[in-house]
Amino acid sequence: MNNTSSSEISSVCANCGKGEEAGIKLKSCTACELVKYCNRDCQIAHRPQHKKECRKRANELHDEKLFKQPPPEEDCPICMIRLSSLREESVYMSCCGKIICMGCSDAPVYDEQGNAVPITCPFCRTPPPSSDEELIKQFMKRIDLNNDPIAMYNLGCMYRDGMNGMPQDGIKALELWHRAAELGSSEAYYNIGYSYKIGYGNLERDEKKTKHYFELAAIEGDTMARHNLGCNEGRVGNIDRALKHYMIASGIGCNRSLESIKGMYREGNATKDDYTEALRSYQAYLNEIKSDQRDKAAAIRDNRAIRDNRY
């Protein structure tokens, strides 16, 4: 067995002690990155004495990544105000691949004389697709030419629901979501995780894989995945981890997570300072994405939903 100091650990094999000066190219343990080996045989031989430290550090690295503040959303290309992290508050334009806030997507467009003109894309001025066939062509063009993960994700949802002329096909939906996820789509990661949760398509229910994909979605900024992870951690008694998830989610606009923190405070599982911080970050986020145009669009949609439910 080789005993090496921490200062030497990066330049010698943790098992046999051979160093790179001997012409050997060392490779780091991919799980913990604490030690290096000259070959797989040395890695296997060293595993019994390394696995406990390796597992501990690997979990630490995973949590550092998981609980890191997610990347911010981009600005709306029309109004230049930060897009909301909530899915229902923005619109993907299949013509040009831009994501537009609902305020801009619902705002009327005027010509040079100030007259309202027929609805077109606020960014590229392309008229909306006139048929399901045209919509699908736009998605396929975005995928073929740009490898667009959002187009892949949306097309997968069409296969899931059997909408817009597409056959209902769970296997095809999952195939598209996996492609989109590999390109960074948080929503695709979430849908894959949820598919494992309910046993959708050709998948069997699997709690570990559900958690795995929800974590990948949360890392990419998906608020629903983050909230669900908090719920799951709280359900099994991991209060500190649940609170961490809720704090991050409330800071990017998740009202459900904010309410969960309030409930934890009432039950004695969170402090008043925790709830105050969450409320402050939630309100700061809302102020960052707020605009009069978005408020008007939200009010119109709320009134429309009330009317539709009434009848």
Image (cartoon, helix red, strand yellow):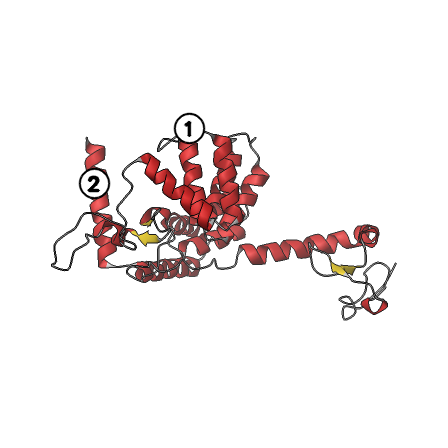
What is the CA distance from the residue labelled 1 to the residue labelled 2? 29 Å
Front-most of residues 176 and 259: 176
Q: Which residue is mark 2?
A: 304
Q: Crowding at label 1, few (<14), some or many (≥20) Cα neighbours within 10 Å?
A: few
Disc 2 marks a residue whose amino acid type is: Arg
**Dot 2, how many residues are within 10 Å of its Cα: few (below 14), some (14-19), or many (20+)?**
few
Image position of 178 with respect to 248: above or below: above
In-front residue for pair 29/176: 176
> Element type at marker 2?
helix
Q: Is residue 64 left or right of residue 90?
A: right
> Percent x, y for residue 71?
46, 59
The structure residue drawn at horizontal position 47% and vertical position 48%, both measured from the top left corner, is: 147
Q: Amino acid at mark 1?
A: Pro
Image location (x, y in percent) of residue 238? 55, 48
Q: Earlier in the sequence, mark 1 or mark 2?
A: 1
Which label number is shown at residue 167?
1
Q: Which mark is residue 156?
A: none
Judged from the image, the secondary structure of the residue bearing numbered disc 1 is: loop
Marks 1 and 2 close (CB-CB < 8 Å)? no
Residue 148 visible, this orientation: no
Quarter of the image holding residue 46?
bottom right
